Amino acid sequence: MDKKMMQRLAMRYSTPFYVFDIETLRNDVRYLREIFGDRAELCYAAKANTFILKEISGMIDRFEICSPGELKICQTLGIEDEKIVLSGVYKAKEDIEILFKEKKPIGIYTVESIRQYLLLETLAEKYHQSIKLILRLSSGNQFGLSKEEIRSVISNIQKAYITVVGLQYYSGTQKRSFKVIDRELDNIVSFVEELKQECGPEFNILEYGPGLKVDYFDDKTVSDSEYLREVADRIKALPADLKIVLEIGRRMTANCGHYFTKVVDIKTNKEHNYAVVDGGIHQLAYFGQSMAMKIPPFTVLSSNFDADKEKWNVCGSLCTVNDILLKEIPVVPLGIGDTFVFHKAGAYCVSEGIALFLSRDIPDVILIDKKQERIVRLDQNAANLNCPKYDL
């Protein structure tokens, strides 16, 4: 997005608001397709950003869905049930059973505990519906099953309606070192090869969340293309009879997002300049940033474009000392109405912030596609959500 477009958006809409550039998004998806070629399917983790699901639905092989709410969004948008991997550490019986009652052909269910497996097995038998399962291997946290539990599930499957088709593994995001991914794949693939002997030819999928990094703070150790090429070469070297599904969220969507917020007050305290903006950390979250210790990518829209720079602290509108977006950053002298545009805000920013803190309104969401604009969420009054209703 060029500066002229930013200025036009800043003049047209009331801050704060999000803009997701669909052309950038699709270019990033195409780039990942090119890098990994036909060796890997792409699975989009919907939790990263639900507002762009429909825009890439024709470019993505699968969608990882982790809650009834995310599933409802997909169904509302017309995402095919067959493309859904229904995941999540908690699957409530009432939410899952309704899918069987309505004969929704969910593509694949993940299994994260013995209890989840027994629930799915019971419902499949009760409703006489065949289902496919992927067993999630734990990386040592609350998610997934141990190797022993996975072997126990496989050895005790006796129901005709259950087919275990593969393994799922995800251990975290922002893996800056290729070596971490390389070691993980060595261990996982070795385990998959063992399981294939027990499960037969149907067991041929590895859904792997590589946790591809996004360089938010200009602290690159290797170039993005070099890093992705290393990962892709490793994926392409995996056994040919193993279908690889890469679950990606952050790397697919980060670059398409921009967050606009306007300066609403300025002051100088103890010789430090402060600009207060109408947004804040409740709506803008970068993985790895705390108290503005790192500098995210941003643009300042100001009429003082040719003035000498000064050091400024940019703070949000929350009543907490933690609400700092930029600390002692050299920018032009700021004035009321100047706008900050924070970039690489396409992944998690819109969904992961403490949106209801202080009951400030939830911002507009705007999609732009080749300069065509569309508002897909009008600002919401958070006070309505936070105020108790005594007549319910």
Image (tube, rainbow, N blue to C red):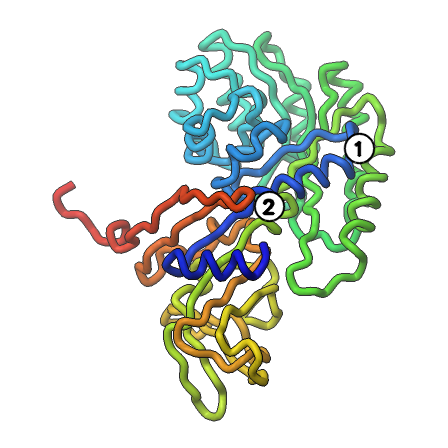
User: Which residue is denoted by mark 1 in the rendering?
Assistant: 189
Residue 230 occupies quadrant = top right
CA–CA distance in space, label 2 to label 1 = 28 Å
User: Residue at 51% of width from left, 10% of height from top?
Assistant: 129
Query: Residue at 63% across / 33% down in the picture?
Result: 43
Q: Position of residue 280 (x, y in %)?
A: 44, 65
Image-quadrant location for residue 139: top right
The local crowd at label 1, few if under 14, some if 14 to 19, many if 20 or more residues have their Cα within 10 Å, is some
In contact (CB < 8 Å): disc 2 and disc 1: no
Which residue occupies the extreme left position in the image? Answer: 391
Question: Picture coordinates of residue 299 (x, y %)?
Answer: 56, 66
Point out residue 86 in the picture as x, y percentages from the top left corner.
Answer: 53, 28
Dot 1: element: helix
Q: Residue at x 60, y 18 (%)?
A: 132
Determine the image quadrant of residue 370: top right
* In the foreground, 46 or 35: 35
Name the amino acid, label 2. Answer: Thr
Is residue 163 rendered to the left or right of residue 377?
right
Nearer the observer: mark 2 or 1; the answer is 2
* Rendered-image quadrant of the N terminus: bottom right
Looking at the picture, does residue 134 appear above or below residue 268? above
Q: Is residue 169 above or below residue 19?
A: above
Vertical placement of residue 244 versus 357, above or below? above
Q: Which mark is residue 253?
A: 2
Instruction: Give x and y (percent) for residue 313.
Output: 50, 78
Give the residue drawn at x 52%, y 39%: 52
